[in-house]
Amino acid sequence: MSGDISLPSYYLYYSAPVKIVETPEGGARVWRLSIDSGGWREENDIFGEITLGVGGEIFRRTPQEFVQEVERFRAHYLEGEGPIFALYETVQALRDTAKAEGRHLTPREQALIRGIRQRSFVMFEEQLRAAGDRGADPDIARAA
């Protein structure tokens, strides 16, 4: 991989989480989060735009920030049943309570939300991997 980009790297691209990972051959693969499924779609055609910083809607993220962004995105766009969606509902309940009380989230609530999102990320990514999604990587959150 040439240039000053180290892989993996993480971004928000027009509000959608995107990750660029190294291929076994030493190239790069771009994975964009799907608004429909919460899984990963390969979109290598946006590599240049992201890495060259063309446009104003591309933001670099740390692995920790990326995990939070992915889960915020999934919770906003997806609906369903089961333990992952129960975690999304818990986060929303914490946010709704603070809003109803006219206050910001407390540091404890913020930490709780970060922890819940990290857990739901691993759970979602493990399900994706088991279903054959080649872009799934639960280890991002474990290392974050």
Image: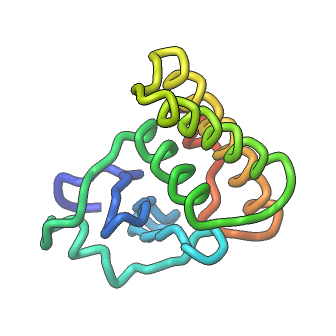
Which one is nearer the viewer's eye here, 24 or 98? 98
Quadrant (top left/top right/bottom left/bottom right) for the N terminus: bottom left
Residue 51, image x, y percentages = 22, 65
In which image quadrant can residue 17 be found? Answer: bottom left
Question: In the rendered view, does 9 fall on the left or right side of 129?
Answer: left
Question: In the rendered view, does 143 fall on the left or right side of 125?
Answer: left
- Name the residue located 69 percent from the left edge and 54 percent from the top edge: 125
Residue 43, image x, y percentages = 44, 80
- Name the residue located 14 percent from the left edge and 72 percent from the top edge: 55
- Name the residue located 31 percent from the left edge and 69 percent from the top edge: 14
Extreme right residue here?
A: 82
Which one is nearer the viewer's eye here, 144 or 4? 144
Question: In the rendered view, does 60 fall on the left or right side of 133?
Answer: left
Extreme top residue here?
A: 108
In which image quadrant can residue 94 be found? Answer: top right
Image height of 131 relative to 142, above or below: below
Which one is nearer the viewer's eye here, 110 or 6? 110
Image height of 12 relative to 42, above or below: above
In which image quadrant can residue 19 be found? Answer: bottom left
- Name the residue located 52 percent from the left edge and 51 percent from the top edge: 72
